[in-house]
Amino acid sequence: MYETVHLSRDAIEMIATYAARAVWPSGFSIYQRGAPADGVFIVVRGRIVLRSRVKSGRGYIPTIVTPGGTFGAEGLAAAVPPPPRYVTEARADEETETLHLDTGRFRALVRERPAAALSLAAQMMAEHATLLEKLRELATLSVEQRLVTSLARMARQRTFVDGDGRLILDAAHYRVLCELVGATRESVSLVLNRLIASGAAERHDGRVYVDTAAVRALRESEWSDSLAALKVSDEQAAVAGD
């Protein structure tokens, strides 16, 4: 319901007159967890990956921000002591253009362009609702269900989608998918192999191509928590085929 909500082009153009514009090269780290936060970023083009590091260097990705989305809004909590700090790291997944409103410019936007400020606030609330839904998924769904749900969400948001409407997972995208699902590479490989066996995906030249229509058609009930029931030999074969 909320995950495909984005700021309109008109709203972005209005906000741009108050914001600082920047272009980030692919792989550039915009900020790190724990750094002082101020204001909010808006993606104009490209993709931003937000990541939280966990044990053993692994990470969890709460969201991928696409054009019309925001990130770093914890920087708007400047009026609440102690001073705000970023709770994730933000990195450009490809060359990305952003707008940045610091707290002073955000207040000016609220005073002078209340309609644009309300649009921005509504966008941040929609993203907040989407994050709450993802927390529910982490707490209640199996790995299979979370992976299918993540693939369907990526298809709706046009993340890693080619001109034919298929999701393309190369080595880098595969890692991102694992961190979006919050599961190990081995567990994700098992589920993707089931998708390949069912015809919903195919492997070619080291990439996995996912039929987004087939993924959207899958019901959560069809993907029971069966990882523990798989034989060790099946798991080894799946990992070897990855």
Image: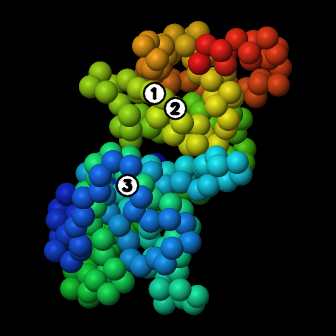
**Residue 64 is at least partly visible in this image:** yes
CB within 8 Å, label 2 to label 1: yes
Residue placed under numbered mark 2 in the picture: 174
Q: Earlier in the sequence, mark 1 or mark 3?
A: 3
Q: Earlier in the sequence, mark 3 or mark 2?
A: 3
Secondary structure category for the residue under label 3: loop
State whether residue 71 is above or below residue 222: below
Residue type at the position of mark 3:
Phe
Examine the rendered structure and indicate whether residue 73 appears above or below residue 23: below
Q: Which residue is mark 1?
A: 169
Residue ID at (74%, 15%): 236
In the picture, measured across the screen, residue 99 lies left or right of residue 206, that is left
| CA gap, disc 3 and disc 2 | 19 Å
Pointers 3 and 2 in contact (C-beta within 8 Å): no
Q: Is residue 113 left or right of residue 71?
A: left
Mark 2 and mark 1: Cα distance apart in space? 5 Å
